[in-house]
Amino acid sequence: MPEERESHIISTIKAYGKNLLGFIRKRVKNDADAEDILQDVWYQFSNLVNSEPIEQTGAWLYKVARNKITDKHKKKSETLLDDLFGGNDDSDDDTSSFKDLLMPEESTPETEYMRNIFWEQLFSALDELPEEQKQVFIWQEMEDMTFQEISELTGVNVNTLVSRKRYAVLHLRDRLQQLYKEITQY
């Protein structure tokens, strides 16, 4: 039985591996993330093979991959919220409440609407910043560039970049705090 299971896993990897990796790569920023997600999919598949039959293996693999990609994007959004609202301070109830509003366990039309408002307000607040602060924030938070990479790209000192991002974060915190108060008043 273990040889049959191993053979099934290997044949599934051969049949779906290349296309599944391509599917994932189109939806994440870099190859390392794509490979991590693919590894998670194969791990979940290998744990499930003997426990319950999978009728449509391909559909199941793509669904798991899609869920893993969504989880990764959700985690990135949570990290952005942590940065905007001061990290993992348990004492800051507003931060966790705002995250609960924007990142609920179950997505509903209301949560999607609030999430869209949040992103609109974030980009509106970013447009209010001086271009240097806005660009550093976008490169660092949304494009996953390090301060060193930004420094090499722009020729600007890392400490100056850190300072610009700090001013951007302070402004965004203030603006998004206003949004939080407006949302929770109703």
Image: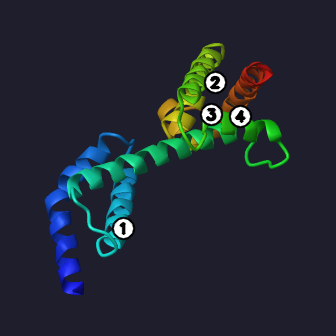
Q: Secondary structure at mark 3?
A: helix
Residue that badge 2 annotates: 133
Residue type pointed to by label 1: Tyr
Residue that badge 3 annotates: 102
Query: Residue 43: which disc?
Result: 1
Whichever of callouts 3 and 1 sits on the residue coming sooner in the sequence is 1
Residue type pointed to by label 3: Leu
Q: Is residue 3 left or right of residue 79?
A: left
| Mark 2–mark 4 CB contact (< 8 Å) | no
Query: Residue 98: which disc?
Result: 4
Closer to the observer: label 2 or label 4? Answer: 4
- Quarter-of-image position of residue 47: bottom left
Q: Residue at x 55, y 41 (%)?
A: 106
Q: Is residue 33 left or right of residue 113?
A: left
| Mark 4–mark 3 CB contact (< 8 Å) | yes
Q: CA distance from mark 4 to mark 3?
A: 6 Å
